[in-house]
Amino acid sequence: MPFYQRLGDVPRKRHIQFRDNGTLLVEEVMGLEGFTGNESILYHLQSPCRVMKLDGFEPIERKEWVPDQHAHRHFKTFDVEPEGDEITGRRLLMWNSDVEISLCRPSGTMDYFFRNGEGDEVIFVHEGSGVLETIFGDVPYKDGDYVVIPRGTTYRFVPEGPQRHLVFETPGLIEIPRRYRNQYGQIMEGAPYYHRDIHPPTELRTVREKGEFPIKVRVRDGYQTYVVDYHPFDVVGWDGYLFPWTFSIHDFEPITGRIHQPPPSHQTFAGQNFVICSFCPRKLDFDPLAVPIPYHHSNLQSEEMIYYVSGNFGSRRGVEVGSITLHPSGLPHGPQPGLAEKAIGMHETHELAVMCDTFHPLKLTPLAKDLDDGKYAYSWYENAQADAGPVEDATGAGLTSHL
Ligand SMILES: [Fe+2]
């Protein structure tokens, strides 16, 4: 999606003969918007349609928890038990028709291939590293990476060490915000990242192997498993604009202003009726009269979830690494009492957090109920009764500056 790429061998022109040891290769065009959107063209040793067995179809079942009260919530996710693999271990926390947000702490590894046939994925790697092996080649990843996987990409995770992922799945497209790109697609000056920060597949390894290879495909709101008789990574070359890539949250260049900059200045990705933003260590607002934390705000048309990655959140009582706060629509939120005064004179923040703002309400699952601390809604009231809590030093360490 970000720019043109080519790996391996491709013929001189599209749609002409291309052979491997005399055998005509199978050309596959993977594209969006009916041959008018971005596409990549792959050259396979075998037809990707060679299904030898259709296994069962498992529909996705989403259980909803409808809270008795509408309120701000805080979910503590850090101690969620590991289970499954990088796909089966995804535990849905909240969702709407535009995005599903899941936690994933796999306890096992994938012995099959996976393809999301009905949506794009962004996987934020909070902990862990490894290689996402894909039909486009290897995509190495490490903690702090967003792994962006367009629909239709056959892949499997080959992890190194324990993993902790925050997973976004959407029926829409994951895109670089339009305002960051010029009319030709190049990321412009002033955008918080550049093409060099985007890491496409590094190496294409063509696997020539017969056997039985299960591919689990998410499609029609369920999972259909197909078994093919040739390794799915049989591509000798591809080119185009559609491929998986990574972007590190540590490469996001934060934008700071003399007075407070709003959350869109932290936007990293654009989705279908949602955005994903990165809150990174940065200098704070520098006007002598600046209040270097946000004003109270009412997200009248959006819901805001924030996942706390690292840093010191001591000023946000009870919030810790792995916490998720959810500020639903219809309610104002802002710094806890006393904090605005305490923040004056702060120069920087060390926070690292991922935010997803959706433009339609989010539903919650029973997992959210299990992880809900039950008290966050009162935290502004509680703090009004006591000291707002320590703000650790004059640099702003401990300042959760975006709430
Ligand atoms: Fe907010």
Image: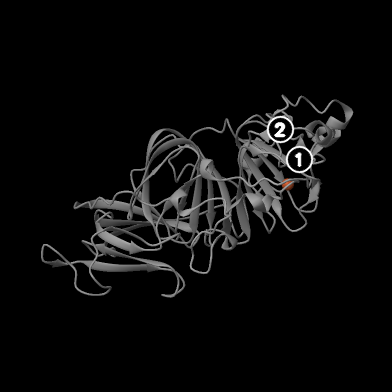
In the picture, the quarter occupied by the N terminus is bottom left
Q: Name which residue type carries label 1.
A: Ile
Query: For mark 2, does the 10 Å Cα neighbourhood hold few (<14), some (14 to 19), or many (20 or more) residues?
Result: many
Percent from the top left, x then y, of residue 70? 78, 47
Question: Quick check: marks 1 and 2 in contact, CB under 8 Å?
Answer: yes
Q: CA distance from mark 1 to mark 2?
A: 9 Å
Q: Is mark 1 within 8 Å of ligand 1?
A: no
Q: Which residue is tagged 2?
A: 399
At horizontal 55% and vertical 45% (from top left) the residue drawn is 252
Quadrant (top left/top right/bottom left/bottom right) for the C terminus: top right
Quarter-of-image position of residue 129:
top left
| Residue under pointer 1 | 293
Q: Nearer the viewer, residue 335 or 356?
A: 335
**Crowd around label 1: few <14 · some 14–19 · many ≥20 (10 Å):** many
Quarter of the image for residue 281 reads: top right
186 or 243: which is nearer to us?
A: 186
The residue at the far right in this view is 385
Residue type, mark 2 in image: Leu
Residue 79: percent from the left, percent from the top? 57, 30
- Front one among 131 and 59: 131
Residue, x 52% and y 40% (percent of image)? 250
Q: In the drawing, does residue 65 fall left or right of residue 211?
A: right
Q: Is residue 353 above or below residue 242?
A: above
Q: How is the image coloured?
A: one colour
The image shows residue 136 at horizontal and vertical percentages of 33, 55
- Could you tell which of marks 1 and 2 lies nearer the N-terminus? 1
Asked which secondary structure carries label 1, the reply is loop
- Secondary element under disc 2, as helix, strand or loop, is loop
Residue 305, relative to residue 28: is it above or below? above
Going by the picture, which residue comes out furthest to the front? Answer: 288
Q: Is residue 7 left or right of residue 142?
A: left
Measured from the top left, where is residue 255 in percent x and y?
A: 64, 47
